Amino acid sequence: MKLLFAHDHIFYKYNNEYYSNGSFPKHVLLRYTDVFDEVKFISRQESVHQQIQKMSLSTTEHVKFIKVPNFKSINKFYKILEARKIIEKEVADADCVIARSSSIGSIAIEYAIKKNKPYAIEVVGCPWDALWNYGNLAGKILAPLSCLKLKKIVKSAPYVLYVTNKFLQKRYPTNGTNISCSNVKIEFIDEQVLINRIDKIHKLKTSNKIILGTAAAIDVKFKGQEYVIEAISKLAKEGYDFEYQLAGNGDDSYLKSIAEKFGVIDKIVFLGAVPQNKIVQWIDNIDIYIQPSKQEGLPRAVIESMSRACPIIASNAGGIPELVEEKHIFKKGNCNELSTKINSLLSDKEEMKNQAIRNFNKSRDYYHEKLDMRRNDFLNEFKTYSMDVNKKYVDKLMDN
């Protein structure tokens, strides 16, 4: 069977090879080629003229990457007609469609319905939270419209995959067959990871430099790194010496201006995009992982930090409270509460150790073998459903 996968993701093309910033490396695409004979991934693309060092290779057998022009800005919106023609053609050529909640995904589902193509949707985030917290008036205008549109699509979708256990299901319910299955891939972890973390916490001295870390794009304002920057400026006055490491690509000018405003530019380290095969080494080096987002589905970096037994403080955005213990959750955007949480955790080594143990054990729920089996069963069921729909459609045409 031929599957069309539709999403707004940007693949970077160099010498006819495709790369991803982390969301769709090769091993993620293999989830779909293990079930379907051929996969076309329709999305945005950018060509680059030098080899990409900090991204993951996406190119794999049986996957073809289809380019849609970028129409997601005011000065490029005129390209939407060209984009729709490409999407319509690819939907018509496919046997079934899987779309992640996005602009391209929504258009693909629209055409799948018109052309009687079986489809499924992966709900990985909330457009209301993303657009409302985007940082401009246009985002706030689009937020309710996008939210209602996704509610309608998900409600009537025959198959839905949610990355959360409760949050997205409650906000975007469906009448279709559905599962909860995170996109995060956690390999088996040796108990030595926990032993090493406990030892690190035991040796931690708050009179020395404390390393905090966040992994997220640095030019997406709803990721909330500015609240950590403000929080550490408050705590620096209490004698703490912080280094805040930011792992993520993007334009750093906004966050640098925030750091300069609060007088902590010397405490901020921009690492750029950290390759997936080096992310655990980075997590092992930090003392507390912080996820300050104003919008999330079920963040990969939080689960990866849990798997490294790292103490975590995070906002109450999206599905994060499903992962992090309530007493270490702060209200999104509240830097006073965040600074209190950081101070409280650093003042209690026993609690840091308890969190290391708790997080490490919780991460076992996201071991890839368990999730891969559930996802594979779901995809195979969707494939069987698609074959049945297509057969009935062909039989109906022949009868006529």
Image (cartoon, helix red, strand yellow):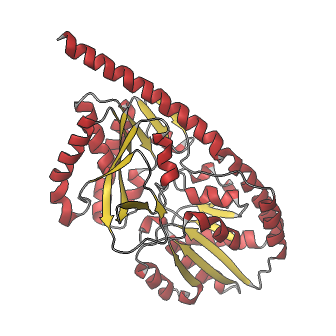
Q: Report the side of 209 relative to 368 (left or right).
A: right
Count of picture labels: 0
Q: Is 250 rendered above or below residue 88?
A: below
Q: Quadrant of the C terminus?
A: top left
Quick check: can you spot residue 176? no
- The picture places residue 180, in percent across and down from the top left corner, at 55, 38
- The picture places residue 199, in percent across and down from the top left corner, at 84, 69
Name the residue nearer the viewer: 239 or 380: 380
Residue occupying image coordinates x 27% and y 62%: 138
Furthest toward the top, the residue is 399
- The picture places residue 279, in percent across and down from the top left corner, at 60, 66
Quick check: can you spot residue 82? yes
Residue occupying image coordinates x 66% and y 69%: 281
Q: Report the side of 152 relative to 198 (left or right).
A: left
Q: Report the side of 244 relative to 61 (left or right).
A: right
Residue occupying image coordinates x 28% and y 42%: 108
- The picture places residue 195, in percent across and down from the top left corner, at 83, 63
Residue occupying image coordinates x 46% and y 54%: 24
Name the residue nearer the viewer: 345 or 285: 285
Q: Quadrant of the N terminus?
A: top left
Q: Is 85 rendered above or below residue 293?
A: above
Name the residue nearer the viewer: 249 or 260: 249
